[in-house]
């Protein structure tokens, strides 16, 4: 069987590339080992985790009503884990079903198989699905590699027990453990912490670095760290290493090593969440001209081309950040290039969102990155305690800040912590991509009372004109 364009992987980057290529009139085949399209994001990542975080947020809001507003619903809710699991699975089924229908309407062929490269223009297809062509091979003119990533589990933690989970296992909700240890203070672990803690689990989180979310700016992490410390009842162990895991009588015994916590403790379950690795092993890429770097990523140019003229690579296999929306845009670039259009991935701001409570989001340069790169910047922040909307919602520990080029007054970065930060960051992405100056933000009327005002207000702090904050300063002259 021959297909002019093959997309290896049916995740958000893969199906976006395939669908756009089909819209451009190309004959497209998706090779996907799963029974459904969607990839990690839809099947066991972004979507199911956000569905569960929605439940966690409602539980948290009800608790706030009880404590702060005098609206009492009685004792903690009785969580039916079977119904929660079923509702989560229903969300996934609805979305994957929709993708299947969209593929049919676009005449995109789907082959359910595991694909690996025999050479630069041939895939070996393994599996027993009826969609696999006779002979088990598929030739192509161009291939878009979109195989994604998987959780990284150190060999020492892979002890053969289902009580030691990765993010996939945690999202399957096998039960509500009484005691859960989360190894890793990154965004995936902290999101799952919010879910399980809301269900009544006593959660401990351990992180080798000296604080949670070490890649994010400290001032954005501070409100979240405060809430997590409360959720965990002080069981946040930073600067601490897990030495070993051992299964003992249906529990996991954990050895801690660190100045703040040392010794042994037992947990019902352990979630290992220390990052992800690209799926480039076992694909036969050594039979092609593709170059794999020291971190396991396929090297690409700005048009997503690899060193092999027949193969493009997108998404998690093509490098950081490992984010679904980055994969989608890379997929569209690859499809347009293959269709003969002038296209390149030249984004200035790729937003990142941590869907905890409160949420953290940033786009463009962070202060951490700016300092490392030696970039001159000025930062101005607007505390949500000065926001009428935030006061009404009881979420006054939020913060919105802009990073501004002091010479041109252009916005080069933005960071937000607070409820809905993931929605608010989109305005910042647009501003950074368009090269907006700070006065473009402040001169745009924002609706009142909303949290979106804080983006405008933070800009007014830069000019020393913020109504709710007295911080006078010499106004910089906007460039022409």
Image (cartoon, grey):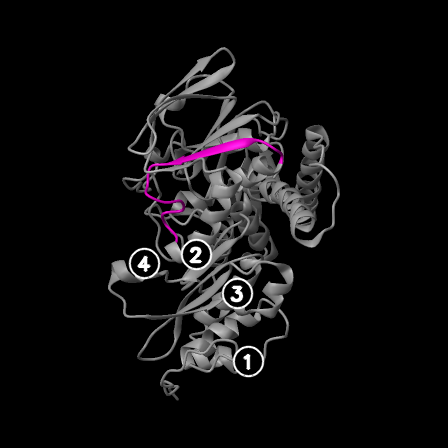
Q: Earlier in the sequence, mark 1 or mark 4?
A: 4
Secondary structure, mark 2, is helix
| Alpha carbon distance from label 1 to label 4 | 28 Å
Q: Residues within 10 Å of mark 4 (few under 14, many from 20)?
A: some
| Alpha carbon distance from label 2 to label 4 | 14 Å
Which mark's residue is nearer the viewer, 3 or 1?
Answer: 3
Q: Earlier in the sequence, mark 2 or mark 4?
A: 2
Residue 303, quarter of the rendered image:
bottom left
Secondary structure, mark 4, is helix
Q: Which residue matches tag 3? A: 384
Residue 283, quarter of the rendered image:
top left
Residue 220 disc label: 2
Q: Which residue matches tag 1? A: 444
Q: Which residue matches tag 4? A: 369
Q: Is residue 210 magenta?
A: yes
Query: Can residue 248 be seen by looking at this rendering?
Result: yes
Q: Are marks 3 and 1 in contact (CB under 8 Å)?
A: no
Q: Residue furthest top?
A: 249
Q: Earlier in the sequence, mark 3 or mark 2?
A: 2
Which mark's residue is nearer the viewer, 4 or 3?
Answer: 3
Q: Earlier in the sequence, mark 4 or mark 3?
A: 4
| Alpha carbon distance from label 4 to label 3 | 24 Å
- At horizontal 63% and vertical 40% (from top left) the residue drawn is 52
Q: Residues within 10 Å of mark 3 (few under 14, many from 20)?
A: many
Secondary structure, mark 3, is helix
Q: Is residue 232 magenta?
A: no
């Amino acid at each position: 069987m021959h297909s002019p364009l093959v997309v290896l992987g049916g995740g958000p980057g893969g199906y976006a590339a395939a669908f756009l290529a089909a819209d451009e009139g190309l004959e497209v085949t998706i090779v996907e080992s799963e029974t459904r399209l969607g990839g990690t994001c839809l099947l066991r990542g972004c979507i199911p985790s956000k569905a569960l975080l929605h439940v966690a947020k409602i539980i948290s809001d009800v608790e706030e009503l009880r404590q702060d507003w005098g609206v009492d619903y009685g004792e903690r809710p009785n969580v039916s884990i079977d119904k929660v699991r079923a509702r989560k699975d229903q969300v996934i089924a609805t979305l994957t079903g929709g993708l299947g229908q969209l593929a049919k309407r676009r005449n995109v062929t789907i082959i359910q198989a595991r694909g690996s490269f025999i050479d630069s223009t041939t895939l070996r297809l393994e599996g027993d699905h009826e969609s696999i062509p006779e002979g088990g091979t598929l030739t192509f003119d161009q291939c878009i590699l979109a195989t994604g990533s998987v959780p990284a589990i150190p060999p020492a933690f892979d002890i053969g027990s289902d009580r030691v989970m990765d993010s996939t296992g945690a999202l399957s909700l096998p039960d509500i453990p009484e005691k859960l240890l989360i190894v890793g203070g990154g965004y995936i672990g902290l999101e799952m912490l919010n879910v399980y803690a809301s269900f009544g689990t006593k959660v401990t989180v351990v992180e080798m670095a000296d604080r949670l979310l070490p890649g994010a700016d400290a001032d954005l992490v501070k409100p979240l760290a405060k809430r997590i410390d409360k959720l965990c009842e002080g069981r946040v162990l930073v600067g601490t290493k897990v030495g070993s895991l051992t299964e003992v009588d249906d529990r996991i015994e954990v050895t801690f090593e660190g100045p703040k916590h040392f010794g042994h403790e037992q947990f019902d379950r352990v979630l290992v969440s220390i990052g992800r690795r690209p799926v480039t092993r076992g694909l036969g890429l050594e039979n092609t001209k593709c170059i794999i770097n020291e971190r396991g990523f396929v090297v690409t140019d700005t048009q997503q081309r690899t060193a092999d003229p027949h193969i493009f690579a997108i998404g998690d296999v093509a490098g950081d950040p490992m984010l679904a929306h980055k994969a989608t845009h890379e997929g569209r670039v690859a499809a347009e290039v293959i269709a003969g259009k002038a296209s390149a991935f030249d984004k200035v701001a790729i937003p990142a969102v941590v869907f905890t409570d409160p949420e953290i989001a940033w786009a463009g340069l962070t202060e951490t990155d700016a300092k490392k790169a030696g970039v001159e910047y000025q930062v101005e922040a607007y505390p949500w305690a000065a926001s009428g909307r935030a006061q009404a919602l009881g979420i006054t520990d939020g913060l919105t800040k802009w990073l501004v080029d002091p010479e041109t007054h252009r916005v080069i970065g933005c960071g937000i912590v607070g409820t809905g930060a993931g929605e608010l960051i989109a305005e910042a992405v647009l501003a950074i991509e368009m090269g907006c100056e700070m006065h473009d933000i402040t001169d745009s009327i924002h609706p009142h009372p909303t949290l979106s005002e804080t983006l405008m207000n933070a800009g007014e702090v830069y000019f020393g004109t913020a109504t709710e904050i007295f911080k006078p300063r010499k106004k910089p002259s906007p460039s022409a």
